[in-house]
Amino acid sequence: MIYRLLLGHAHGTSTVHILSMLDYRALELRSGLTSNPVHTIYPLSDDSTVHSGSKRLLTASSIGLCHWNISDAHDQPILVAGTGNQGVCISLAYCPNSDNIVATFRPKVDVPDETVISQLSQAPFLNMGHHVQGSHVLVKRLGSIYQTLGSTSANVPGIRLPKSTIVELDDSNSAFACGDEATSNLVLQGLPSLTFTQSLQSYHPIRDVRYAASQKPGVICCLGQDRMQFFSQKYL
C-alpha cells in the first residue's frame, strides 16, 4: 500500500505553483498555472476510473480552483470555469458524497508598487480582525466537469485564510458551514440554495471548521483563538 502526502507551495519567483507528491519511493513535482501557492487540496474519486488507476485532485489557490489529473505526467491542471473571475479564493469546502463544492472569495486589491504596500499594511481592511464583503460560490462536480450553481455574499476575513466545511444532514440534505467574520459565529447555509439556516454562537473569529460523520449524530468542531467548540448534528 502506498501513502502519499500532497503539498502545495510556491517555487521561488517562477510563474508556476507546484504540487508535490511524496511517498516512500519518490518525490514528484507538478507545475501549476501561476506562482500563487496552493492552500487547499482534496483527492477526488471517480467510480468509472478506479480500475484504470486514474488519480484526480481538486486544489484551491488565490486564482481559483484547479482540477488535476495526476495519473498522467503530461497533463496540466485546468482552472475550474467560473472560479477565476470571482476575486481572491481564500477557502474551499468539498463533500465527496454529493460532489458539492463551495469556494469562498474576497475582493482583489491592486497593489501598484512597494511604496503602496507599506501604506496598505496599515489600512483597516487588511487588519486580521477586520472583515470585508466577499462571496461563497457553489459548484457541482460531474466527473471532470464543473457547473457553477449560485453564489451569495458573505463577511470574510480581510487577509486571513479561513476554513469551511460541508455538513451532511438527515434526508440527504446538506449545509455549508463557515465562520461569519462580522459576528464570529458559525453560520450554516442550506445547499444548493446557500440560504441562511442557522447561526451558532462562538466567541472568537473561527480559525478552522471540521465535520466528523463517522459517528451518529455527526459533530462540527470549531477552532477559535484559545478554545475548541463542538456542536452535535442532533441539535442542528
Image (spheres, grey):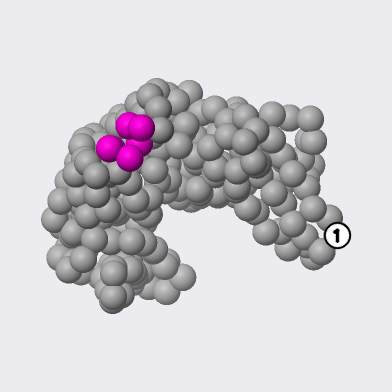
Q: Nearer the viewer, residue 145 or 217?
A: 145
Above or below residue 97? Residue 112 is above
Say whether residue 47 is magenta. no
* Rendering coords of residue 167 (x, y %): 35, 56
* Chief SS of the magenta region: helix
Residue pictured at 40% horizontal, 46% vertical: 91
**Relative to 26, is 130 on the left or the right?**
left
Which residue is outermost to the right? Answer: 25
* Rendering coords of residue 172 (x, y %): 36, 51
Say whether residue 118 is magenta. yes
How many numbered discs sit on the rendered protein? 1
Residue pictured at 54% horizontal, 27% vertical: 79
Above or below residue 43? Residue 205 is below
* Rendering coords of residue 34 (x, y %): 58, 30
Secondary structure of residue under mark 1: loop
Residue pictured at 78% horizontal, 47% vertical: 28
Q: Nearer the viewer, residue 160 or 77?
A: 160
| Residue that carries the numbered disc 1 in the rendered image | 25
* Rendering coords of residue 159 (x, y %): 32, 46
**Relative to 61, is 235 on the left or the right?**
left
Q: Residues within 10 Å of mark 1 (few under 14, many from 20)?
A: few
Residue pictured at 71% horizontal, 59% vertical: 4
State which quarter of the image contains the C terminus.
bottom left
Type of the residue with mark 1? Arg
Above or below residue 24? Residue 10 is above
Residues in magenta? 115-120
Q: Residue 51: in sight, yes or no?
A: no
**Relative to 160, is 48 on the left or the right?**
right
Q: Residue 161: in sight, yes or no?
A: yes
